Image (cartoon, helix red, strand yellow):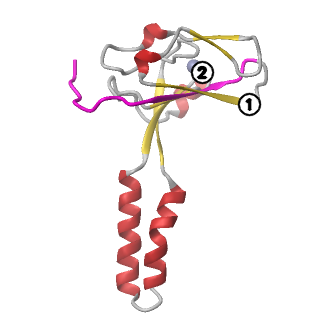
Amino acid sequence: MSYDPHPIRWIDLVLPHPEDPNRWLTLKADGPFALRSWYYAPGTRTEIRLHLDVRTPEGGLTGCLHCGESPLYTKTVMRWGLVALMALPGAIVAIWSVTFGVLLMMLAGLIGGLLSRRELVCYACGAQHRGFRMHPKHGPFDANLARAK
Ligand SMILES: [Zn+2]
């Protein structure tokens, strides 16, 4: 068991819509243990059942909450809008001093990298799990595993 002193404040689940394969729906909860075992899909009477048994006591996942299957992969999501906003002062400064402007833009990229978030994605159904602990670890996307599904 690993100890992480930082509390989990919220989680997001992005799940395939049960009636429309082209839509996704998002469930939000105050942490992995605030989830119920089922929800209604918004605007429908279709139940979405969650596989809560894949949660670990630390707040991580051993498999997908939506389909119950494993494995999952870890995806890093950059916040490009935020990076572009932070790089803007560097771009303006670069008009007068290229070196200092480029340094400011590199700093913006570095901060953007630190602010990127990681999510767990299911190979089978594509459900995205955000805000969960990263223990147990799931590797990055593996095309061979994706093809096997
Ligand atoms: Zn899944």
What percent of the width, then of the height, locates residue 16?
67, 24
For the residue pair 42 and 132, the one nearer the viewer reads as 42
Q: Is mark 2 within 8 Å of ligand 1?
A: yes
Q: Is 45 displayed left or right of 73 in the figure?
A: right
Q: Identify which residue is drawn at 40% across, 81% down.
A: 101
Q: Disc 2 on helix, strand or loop?
A: loop
In the depicted structure, whether residue 4 falls above or below residue 56: below
Q: From which residue to which does the magenta span run?
A: 1-18
User: Which of the image's four quarters has the C terminus?
Assistant: top right
Question: Label 1 vs label 2: CA separation?
Answer: 16 Å
Residue for badge 1: 23
Residue 123 falls in image quadrant: top right
Report x, y in % for residue 39: 62, 13
Residue at image point 41% right, 72% down? 105
Q: Amino acid at mark 2?
A: Ala
Q: Is residue 125 left or right of residue 102?
A: right
Disc 1 or 2, which lies upstream in sequence? 1
Residue 147 appears anywhere in the view? yes
- Residue under numbered circle 2: 124
